[in-house]
């Protein structure tokens, strides 16, 4: 969709791009086509979150047999229903939906997920997919470039943190494309990146207790300037921490961002 088309569509429906929903409409046709085609080789059904005016949706209905969209803005819901055929749309907040129930009701095959995400809820959406929808094995998400850097980060970098560890353990993650602010209307103040996630058949390393693992990883990165020991001592007994770190030959004065994913998993396994 060109800018003039977007303006005319918004005006005709007395709608506007709402900051509270993080609405920035993607207008770069090459980016739209690249995102839509990213997973179609292995999937025939797809979920979209926050379609807005449907710029991406128009490509999805060409590339996939079944399309289900979640949209929180009632005006955008109305526009899509009136302009794009063959789309099932649910009006509401994706984070509050029972996605597994919706998948069973609306799809004949397991869907992937593709979305230009509202940036302010990127992390909660990814965590929801990780924890609540194990049937979604592949998803492509556009997000703020800074968040993508955190997800892809390696040890000994300022971006490396709990999100890096959690997602790298459960997903194979690759960068698809970077996207400039000029590819949107209205243009955001930040650059964007599109990542492709594929759920591992087994976690990268064996995990004894998944719930404990997620909790302990969060604790380890609670305050980045503190040492590993100081972050852990508010939750675990000193003798227990000493025993675990000694057995793994890890210096208690090290910071969590200096540890590999495997080292962090080993610490979590022994502490849990």
Image (cartoon, helix red, strand yellow):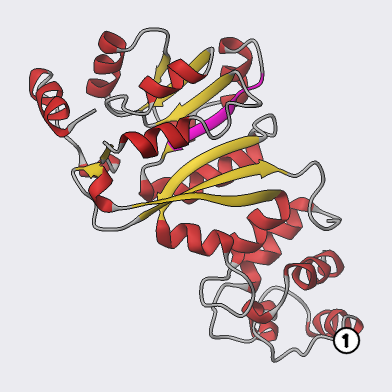
Circle 1 — which element? helix
Residue 51 horizontal side relative to residue 74, left or right: right
Task: Point out residue 129 in the picture as x, y percentages from the top left corner.
Answer: 59, 39
Quadrant position of the C terminus in the picture: bottom right
Residue 87 image point, x, y percent: 42, 12
| Residue 25, image quadrant | top left
**What residue do we see at 62% from left, 70% from top?**
154
Q: Which residue is mark 1?
A: 246
Residue most extreme to the front:
30
| Region in magenta | 110-115
In magenta stretch: residue 209: no
At horizontal 27% and vertical 45% (from top left) the residue drawn is: 183
Is 155 drawn above or below residue 13 in the view shown?
below
Q: Picture coordinates of residue 196 (x, y %)?
A: 57, 44
- Residue 71: where, in percent of width, then height? 36, 26
Q: Magenta span has 113? A: yes
């Amino acid at each position: 969709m060109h800018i003039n088309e977007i303006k005319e569509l918004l005006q005709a429906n007395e709608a506007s791009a709402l900051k509270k929903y993080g609405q920035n409409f993607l207008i770069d046709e090459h980016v739209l086509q690249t995102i839509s085609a990213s997973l179609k080789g292995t999937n025939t059904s797809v979920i979209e979150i926050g379609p807005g005016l449907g710029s991406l949706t128009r490509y999805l209905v060409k590339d996939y047999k079944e399309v289900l969209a979640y949209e929180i803005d009632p005006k955008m819901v109305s526009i899509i229903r009136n302009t794009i055929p063959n789309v099932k749309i649910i009006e509401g907040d994706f984070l509050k939906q029972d996605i597994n129930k919706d998948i069973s009701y609306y799809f004949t095959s397991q869907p992937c997920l593709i979305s230009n995400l509202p940036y302010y809820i990127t992390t909660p959406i990814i965590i929801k997919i990780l924890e609540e929808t194990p049937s979604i094995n592949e998803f492509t998400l556009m997000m703020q470039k800074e968040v993508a850097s955190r997800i892809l980060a390696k040890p000994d970098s300022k971006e490396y943190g709990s999100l890096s560890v959690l997602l790298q353990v459960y997903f194979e993650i690759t960068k698809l494309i970077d996207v400039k602010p000029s590819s949107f209307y209205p243009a955001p103040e930040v650059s964007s990146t599109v990542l492709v996630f594929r759920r591992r058949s087994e976690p990268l390393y064996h995990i004894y207790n998944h719930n404990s693992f997620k909790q302990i990883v969060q604790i380890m990165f609670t305050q980045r300037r503190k040492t590993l020991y100081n972050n852990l001592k508010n939750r675990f007994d000193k003798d227990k921490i000493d025993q675990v770190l000694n057995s793994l030959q890890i210096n208690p004065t090290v910071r969590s961002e200096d540890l590999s994913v495997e080292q962090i998993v080993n610490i979590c396994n022994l502490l849990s």
